Amino acid sequence: MKKLLLIAIAAFAVNAASAQSTTMQLPAYATTVKGHVDSILVGRVSVVNISNQSIDVKVARKVISEVKGSENVFCWTQCYTPMVSVSPDVETILAGATNTMFYGDYSANGFAGKTTIRYSFFRVNGAAPDSVHATIVYDASRTTGVKKAFDASNAISLPSPNPANDMTTIGYNLPANARSSKIKLYNAIGGLVKEISLSDKQGAIMLVTSGLPSGIYFYTLQVDNRALTTKKLVVKH
């Protein structure tokens, strides 16, 4: 009886160890990112494929606690709008390779405090589910000593009119060192609808909405492949 019990315990230990194994590892990353309330705080995480075969990986975001009035997005293959919590895109990581494509952008929009977000990287191919997790605290303060460089919350204006019928106007004010800038319009499920390149550092665009179905949209200012801020547009015919 004792021998059978020992065998059962050993089998349980093996199964528990197997359940904890993973094809991915996360190298050391900054678990707390500090910055000024008017700066964009960026959290970066690398993912290492420690298996002997390629894996397809998606990312899921879970906001554990959030400062009211703040915004956050994440990028994995491309940058998504705030309402996207699971990446529609897959990153293929070769055996033994390290993927450095992920980063989370946090905009406090002038509100001080800490926002905690957990990012889960999960494999979508293979027989068994597999995932690793990274938790980052974004700590925005007015007294961090970080130089206030750019007010991201005012980088693009609210649309006028809003709701829009045939067209609406959106003003923008880009950072002085911006090299490549776009305004991207997404539908309510995160699909890209329009993309408008910006040539001037400051100005306004006329967005034609007559051909868009009525509904809720989000537009994001992207500067140098980084999403700075996102705002909402309602189209109503």
Image (cartoon, helix red, strand yellow):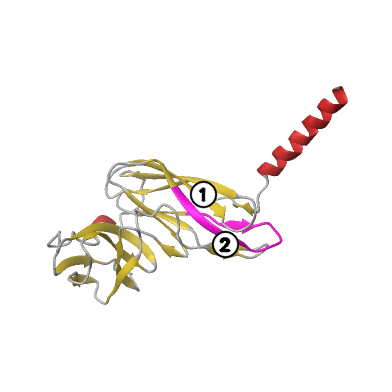
Q: Which amino acid does label 1 sit on?
A: Ser
Identify the residue position indicated by label 1 in the image: 120
Q: Which of 90 and 42 is in front in this view?
A: 90
How far from the left and from the top, in percent, is residue 25?
A: 62, 52
| Mark 2 / mark 1, whichever is N-terminal | 2
Q: Nearer the viewer, residue 81 or 39?
A: 81
**Mark in the foreground, 2 or 1:** 1
Q: Which residue is drawn at 13% across and 62% down?
A: 160
Magenta span of residues: 44-61
Q: Is residue 53 magenta?
A: yes
Q: Most prominent secondary structure in the magenta stretch? A: strand
Secondary structure at numbered mark 2:
strand
Q: Which amino acid does label 2 sit on?
A: Asn
Which residue is most to the bottom? 199
Mark sitting on residue 99: 2
How far from the left and from the top, in percent, is residue 119?
A: 48, 49
Q: Is residue 52 magenta?
A: yes
The vertical placement of 62 against 78, above or below, is above
